[in-house]
């Protein structure tokens, strides 16, 4: 096995370990809890609040609740995909292929002046979903960064050591 393949294997193992970390477990729980909380709000108190809104704000409510739902479903898909890696149901490489269907940048909310006319609880759910989305995006970049980018984040001598190792293996 060449030095490069060993390095890439170590990087994949590091990325797979991230899905087994306490940080991922916390993020997963936060994401699933937010999905459940949002569904309960939109089916309950949110439905009542929406009826009391004037027509223009009601349209904004419908648009933003759809964006919120879409954003949360995309994040839930990403989280479930990476939980499958953690559980050994798929490899990180398989997850990387599947995650191309997940759009973590989808459904960003409208302008702040539009959002501020919505019921406070919906505003809070939108804000929390955006915070969660930022965390998921950062983790996604960390886990799925090309191996050449990840190599630079560890030991700064790693590229040199790899070349030295490769030089001695070929002689």
Image (cartoon, rainbow, N blue to C red):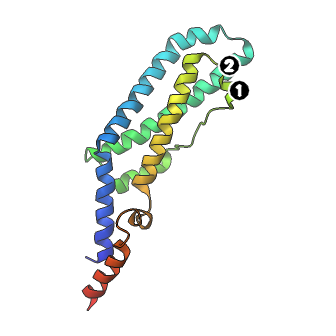
Residue in the foreground of this view, choosing between 114 and 103: 114
Q: Position of residue 1 (x, y in %)?
A: 25, 76
Say what secondary structure mark 2 lies in: loop
Say what secondary structure mark 1 lies in: helix
18 relative position to 71: left or right:
left
Whether residue 26 is visible here, answered yes or no, is yes
Residue 105 position by quadrant: top right
- The answer to whether 37 is drawn above or below residue 84 in the figure is above
Q: Position of residue 80 (x, y in %)?
A: 37, 39
- Number of other residues with Cα within 10 Å of mark 1, as a class: few under 14, some 14 to 19, many 20 or more: few
Residue sitting at x 36%, y 57%: 93
Residue sitting at x 33%, y 41%: 23
Give the residue furthest to the front.
Answer: 156
Q: Which residue is mark 2?
A: 117
Whether residue 91 is visible here, answered yes or no, is no
Q: Position of residue 147 (x, y in %)?
A: 40, 65
Q: Position of residue 144 (x, y in %)?
A: 42, 55
- Give the alpha-carbon distance from disc 2 to disc 1, as whole Å: 7 Å
* CB under 8 Å between discs 2 and 1: yes
- Number of other residues with Cα within 10 Å of mark 2, as a class: few under 14, some 14 to 19, many 20 or more: some
Report the quarter where the C terminus lies.
bottom left
78 relative position to 116: left or right:
left
Q: Which residue is mark 1?
A: 113
Residue sitting at x 36%, y 78%: 160
Residue sitting at x 29%, y 44%: 21
């Amino acid at each position: 096995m060449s030095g490069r393949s060993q390095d890439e294997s170590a990087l994949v193992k590091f990325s797979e370990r991230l899905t087994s970390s306490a940080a991922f477990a916390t993020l997963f729980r936060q994401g699933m809890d937010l999905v459940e909380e949002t569904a309960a709000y939109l089916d309950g108190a949110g439905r009542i609040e929406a009826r009391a809104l004037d027509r223009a704000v009601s349209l904004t409510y419908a648009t933003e609740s759809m964006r919120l739902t879409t954003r949360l479903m995309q994040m839930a898909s990403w989280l479930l995909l990476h939980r499958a890696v953690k559980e050994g149901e798929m490899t990180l490489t398989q997850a990387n292929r599947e995650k191309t269907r997940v759009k973590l940048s989808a459904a960003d909310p409208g302008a702040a002046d539009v959002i501020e006319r919505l019921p406070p609880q919906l505003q809070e759910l939108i804000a929390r979903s955006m915070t969660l989305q930022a965390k998921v995006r950062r983790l996604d970049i960390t886990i799925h960064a090309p191996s050449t980018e990840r190599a630079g984040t560890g030991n700064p001598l790693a590229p040199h050591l790899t070349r030295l190792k490769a030089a001695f293996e070929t002689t």
